[in-house]
Image (cartoon, rainbow, N blue to C red):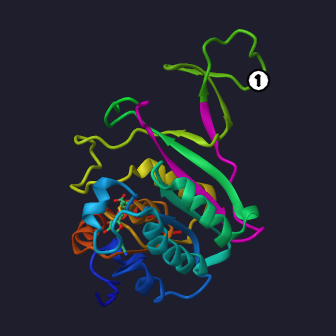
């Protein structure tokens, strides 16, 4: 599919670039070193996606790596010297992909294995219920941008925590602590208000956290497997410039619809 660029229409479209096509083509449209953050949420190595993406690979892990790694290499080229990449995977392929990603970025550029823990989905069979995805966090270079975020840590009681930054609200006592690498963020349910009809849509809260960690307002954020456009919506709402792409016309249509629904107030000007 021939790449296309949309830069006009809704206010959102003015702060976003949307391209159509395979990652290898769409990344070639951009300048090397021009993005501060890339989020990559590729089709997982699972039976579900094997049917959908049968034209790219046929379910063998080596074939999956052969498909994925040239695209990761193309994305890496676009990262600024201070930039970072988050690769979103699950248990099917994460261990094999981690080895290949270490080779691509260098082991010393691997910063975190983030566990996104959720409670939706099935209960499994003769194994534990699988309730997490894994995000591999890599930096382009040693001078990467990183904001030390804090998160709420609930306490069972106040006693003994005097002078230790304990606060109390209607949910009880808590402290703000530096963010851990296990993220409890609810996955979207069918009736979630932000839900669009897209099967693998990720929560805005997940993308907001990633964007807050490694970018500042005005930075450019890229997602070349953008699906329903969650990254673009979050980035735009947070005053970042966004570039998105996907090979599927349905995904691009879904992304455009979401961007067009953003209100002028949500489009913060950095
Ligand atoms: C897991 S979904 C992304 C979901 C997205 N993060 C969201 O929140 O909606 C993966 C996307 O990759 C796209 N895709 C698959 N192969 C591709 C390729 N070779 N180039 C570009 N996009 C591709 C699919 O069309 C799909 O929309």
Image quarter of residue 153: top right
Front residue of 189/64: it is 64
Q: How far from the left and from the top, in percent, is residue 20?
A: 32, 81
For residue 220, which quarter of the picture? Answer: bottom right
Q: Is residue 245 left or right of residue 54?
A: right
Q: Where the N terminus falls, by quadrant?
A: bottom left
Examine the structure image and report whether residue 144 is included in the region drawn in magenta. Answer: yes
What is the x, y in percent for residue 266? Answer: 39, 60
Q: What residue sits 75% from the left and 11% below the top?
A: 160
Q: Which residues are magenta?
A: 127-152
Helix, strand, or loop for circle 1? loop
Q: Ligand 1 lies in which image quarter?
A: bottom left
The location of residue 176, given as percent across then percent down, is: 66, 33
Say whether residue 13 is left or right of residue 96.
left
The residue that disc 1 covers is 164
Name the residue rendered at 43%, 70% in the picture: 63
Question: Does 150 lie within the magenta span?
Answer: yes
Please tell me whether residue 160 is drawn above or below residue 164 in the rendered image: above
Label 1 lies in ligand 1 vicinity (Cβ under 8 Å): no
Residue under the point 38% across and 59% down: 230
- Find residue 18 and report its horizontal and vertical position in percent: 36, 78
Q: Relative to 269, say whether 19 is above or below.
A: below
Residue 200: in sight, yes or no?
A: no
Determine the image quadrant of residue 196: bottom left
Estimate how packed mark 1 is, as few (under 14), some (14 to 19) or many (20 or more) residues with alpha carbons within 10 Å.
Answer: few
């Amino acid at each position: 599919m021939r790449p296309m660029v949309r830069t006009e229409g809704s206010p959102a479209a003015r702060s976003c670039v949307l391209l159509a096509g395979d990652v290898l083509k769409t990344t070639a449209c951009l300048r090397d070193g021009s993005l501060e953050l890339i989020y990559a949420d590729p089709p997982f190595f699972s039976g579900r996606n094997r049917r959908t993406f049968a034209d790219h690979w046929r379910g063998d892990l080596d074939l999956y790596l052969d498909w994925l790694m040239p695209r990761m290499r193309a994305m890496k080229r676009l990262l600024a010297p201070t930039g970072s990449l988050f690769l979103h995977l699950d248990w099917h392929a994460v261990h094999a992909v981690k080895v290949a990603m270490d080779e691509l970025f260098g082991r010393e550029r691997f910063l975190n294995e983030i566990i996104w823990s959720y409670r939706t989905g099935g209960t499994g069979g003769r194994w534990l219920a699988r309730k997490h995805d894994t995000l591999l966090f890599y930096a382009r270079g040693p001078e990467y941008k990183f904001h030390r975020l804090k998160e709420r840590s609930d306490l069972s009681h106040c006693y003994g925590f005097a002078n230790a930054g304990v606060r109390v609200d209607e949910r009880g006592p808590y402290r703000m602590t530096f963010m851990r690498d296990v993220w409890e963020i609810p996955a979207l349910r069918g009736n979630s208000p932000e839900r669009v009809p897209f099967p693998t849509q990720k929560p805005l809260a997940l993308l907001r956290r990633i964007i807050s960690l490694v970018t500042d307002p005005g930075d450019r954020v890229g997602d070349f497997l953008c699906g329903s456009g969650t990254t673009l919506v979050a980035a735009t709402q947070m005053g970042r410039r966004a570039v998105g792409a996907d090979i599927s016309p349905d995904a691009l249509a879904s992304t455009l619809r979401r961007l067009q629904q953003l209100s002028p107030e949500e489009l913060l000007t950095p």
